Image (cartoon, grey):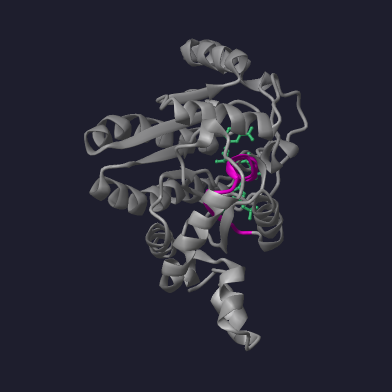
Amino acid sequence: MPGVYSGLTAARQQNAPAIIIAKKHSAFTLMPYSCFIFPATIYHVTNKGTRTPMSMQYSAILITGASSGIGAALARHYACAGTTLFLSGRNLARLKQVENDCRAKGANVFSDVLDVTERETLHDYVIQCDGIMPLSLVIANAGISAGTGQDGESPEQVRDILATNVAGVLNTIDPAVACMTLRRRGQIAIMASQASYRGLPSAPAYCASKAAVRVYGEGLRGALAPFGVKVNVICPGFVQSRITDANDFPMPFFMKADKAAKIIDRGLTRNKGIIAFPWQMNIASTFLKLLPQSILDRAAKRIPRKAASAPRVLPE
Ligand SMILES: NC(=O)c1ccc[n+]([C@@H]2O[C@H](COP(=O)([O-])OP(=O)(O)OC[C@H]3O[C@@H](n4cnc5c(N)ncnc54)[C@H](OP(=O)(O)O)[C@@H]3O)[C@@H](O)[C@H]2O)c1
């Protein structure tokens, strides 16, 4: 499968015995071995410690963009004995680090390198994860932003942002929704942002991408409720991550990623439609949403921008 780190392939290349495959814990390769994994998970539940009460309801969690930032913090937060985690990202080294941390906390972990923009890959991946262990929670978290220097977002950046933050979310949740509606149980969390409240000159494509998934999630929540599937939209303010590491301007109410993970978990457990935090930033963002466009136009020059991270490429 293109672009996917496969534990099975790695084991075959090394001419290694089958047991190595299980240790590699790639969801793509472990589907045929699921009958061995279930007893192993039960062993974890009965013999290895306890879980935090807040996360008690989730036995199998899939998180995209788990190799850093908020996704990695969520993975570490949910990691405990009795929980199976399906983690993915593009960077193998970072993903492995998160996988090791989660396994050290007793979780059953499968990690795969994949790109959420590849629809077929995501479809096969999610279906195989669900086959290993029926997914109780899917967090469509993977996302990117672009530097927006004086030239603004380049046409390539705009397309990359929409492909990752919008199509990537749909690629992740569509197969999960299909599985969950069939068994009339499950929860889908969509990572939006408070940047979704208003189109800002500092990041037009990013704001647009987050507005698209926020509004989609708001509607999907009511549409899927009769099928027993919960949908939640997450709207963080500024949280420490590789995205905010690139910001060289003051970020009000800046929050550590592990604190954000706790707030998200609490919101998901309570099945809140919109999980927006920090509350102070949410008030400020809501105020921004209500401002007349003419005032925003006048303030546009003062809105901070990131340094451009990629050269602007003009269309032919
Ligand atoms: N940090 C904030 O202040 C903030 C605020 C509001 C919303 N958010 C949203 O929170 C989510 C997580 O971002 P973050 O802030 O934690 O930033 P981050 O540290 O850069 O994490 C982004 C994650 O998404 C993954 N990713 C990006 N593009 C991908 C692709 N095409 N396929 C698969 N994985 C991909 C990255 O993988 P690699 O490590 O392999 O690149 C990484 O694991 C994003 O949707 C972001 O928009 C963040």
Residue 255, horizontal then vertical, whole percent: 69, 26
User: Which of the 4 image quarters holds residue 151?
Assistant: top right
- Depth check: give the residue in front, 45 or 236: 45
Above/below status of 215 relative to 81: above
User: Is residue 88 inside the magenta stretch?
Assistant: yes
Residue positioned most to the left? 226
User: Which of the 4 image quarters holds residue 194?
Assistant: top right
Residue 242, horizontal then vertical, whole percent: 70, 43
Residue positioned most to the front? 47
Above/below status of 212 relative to 28: above
- Depth check: give the residue in front, 270 or 211: 270
Number of numbered callouts drawn: 0
User: Is residue 23 inside the magenta stretch?
Assistant: no
> Magenta residues, as a range?
71-90
- Depth check: give the residue in front, 129 or 106: 106
The answer to whether residue 272 is left or right of residue 222 is right
Residue 35, horizontal then vertical, whole percent: 41, 68
Question: Is residue 156 visible from the viewing direction of this image?
Answer: no
The answer to whether residue 95 is left or right of residue 216 is right
Residue 157, horizontal then vertical, whole percent: 57, 48
Question: Is residue 214 visible from the viewing direction of this image?
Answer: yes
Q: Quadrant of ligand 1?
A: top right
